[in-house]
Image: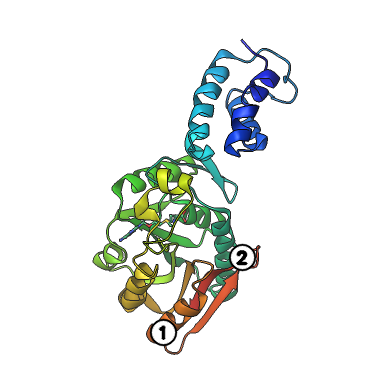
């Protein structure tokens, strides 16, 4: 039996050795306490509930092995919405929240006279993008696809959790949208964009699904597939939004130019000043 305070400091040495900050451990314990309606900071010196202590000790082992905190917890937050995550889906990243901000502001500006905006999120993973957009803008009539049926199951659970109405489909890139004959006003994708040979952080490569990471030898395979097929799924006045790798701006702009001759093509930076989002407007 230990107090919360003692639990927190039991593993300091091991965390130090692995370069994991005490903040990570604190956040983990804080979330476990929250789930059990305990206020960690008021009860710091009280004896820990057995259920919390057990989950904490088991979870700390996984974190020390290098597993990302959000997989250990089983959830994360994206744009303020709780999203369940497991090894079948990528943990949604902060950078992607900025893409949501961009899409909301551009649809506000260019779709304000429309009653509904037909949209699709291609490669939805946990469903984070589709769900955040559907919750934030009621005009979206949202579909979401992924090649991984396991990922789509997680996304469906997240849509239910957040009471978001989304039509989910399993399939290769634009195929499910084409098959259903859906014509989009807005297409969104954060596809796998890491070149296959790139050396990655161990916690990413060991725990996150590889189908969510790698985008062929140059990292552009999935953008190419969407650019090639865009005419089959888009309406005439559509907009497309993508997350991109920080070093892909020149190559992706050149590629986009080949497929969207007269469109406005713009790469926008994220909060860290890195090229992160591609916006195409016919
Ligand atoms: C970088 S993750 C993005 C996940 C989520 N949209 C997000 O932003 O957190 C890319 C997603 O694309 C999916 N994917 C990979 N290849 C695909 C394909 N050929 N067709 C559809 N989805 C694919 C993966 O399963 C993964 O969920």
Q: Position of residue 114 (x, y in %)?
A: 51, 72
Residue 88 at what x, y percent from top left? 37, 44
In the current view of this chain or complex, which residue is farthest to the bottom?
A: 262
The answer to whether 78 is drawn above or below residue 262 in the figure is above
Report the residue at 42% width, 43% height from top. 207
Res 236 quadrant in image:
bottom left
The local secondary structure at tag 1 comes to: loop
Seen from this angle, which residue lies furthest top? 1
Residue named by callout 1:
260
Which residue occupies 67% across, 36% down?
23
Q: CA distance from mark 1 to mark 2?
A: 24 Å
List the single residue furthest toward the front.
Answer: 17
Q: Residue 139 location in percent, x, y?
A: 50, 62
* In-image side of 249 versus 228 (left or right): right
The answer to whether residue 18 is visible is yes
Tell me the SS state at disc 2: loop
- Left or right of 175, for residue 56: right
Give residue 32's quadrant in the image: top right
Ligand 1 is found in the corner quadrant, namely: bottom left
Residue 270 numbered mark, or none: 2
């Amino acid at each position: 039996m230990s107090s919360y305070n003692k639990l927190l400091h039991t593993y300091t040495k091991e965390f130090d050795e692995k370069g994991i900050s005490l903040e990570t451990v604190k956040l983990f314990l804080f979330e476990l306490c929250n789930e059990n309606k305990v206020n960690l900071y008021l009860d710091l010196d009280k004896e820990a509930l057995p259920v919390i202590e057990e989950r904490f000790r088991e979870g700390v082992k996984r974190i020390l092995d290098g597993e990302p905190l959000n997989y250990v917890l089983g959830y994360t937050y994206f744009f303020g919405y709780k999203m369940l995550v497991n090894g079948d889906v990528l943990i949604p990243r902060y950078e992607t929240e900025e893409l949501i901000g961009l899409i909301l502001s551009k649809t506000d500006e260019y779709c304000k006279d429309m009653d509904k905006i037909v949209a699709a999120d291609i490669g939805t993973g946990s469903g984070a993008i589709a769900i955040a957009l559907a919750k934030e803008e009621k005009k979206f009539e949202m579909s979401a696809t992924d090649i991984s049926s396991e990922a789509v199951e997680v996304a469906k659970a997240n849509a239910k959790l957040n009471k978001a109405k989304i039509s989910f489909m399993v399939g290769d890139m634009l195929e499910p949208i084409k098959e259903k004959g859906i014509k989009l006003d807005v297409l969104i994708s954060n596809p796998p964009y890491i070149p296959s040979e790139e050396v990655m952080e161990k916690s990413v490569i060991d725990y996150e699904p590889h189908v969510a990471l790698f985008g062929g030898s140059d990292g552009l395979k999935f953008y190419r597939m969407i650019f090639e097929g865009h005419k089959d799924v888009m309406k005439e006045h559509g907009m497309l939004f993508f997350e991109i790798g920080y070093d892909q701006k020149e190559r992706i702009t050149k590629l986009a130019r080949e497929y969207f001759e007269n469109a406005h093509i713009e790469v926008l930076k994220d909060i860290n000043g890195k090229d992160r989002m591609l916006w195409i407007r016919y």
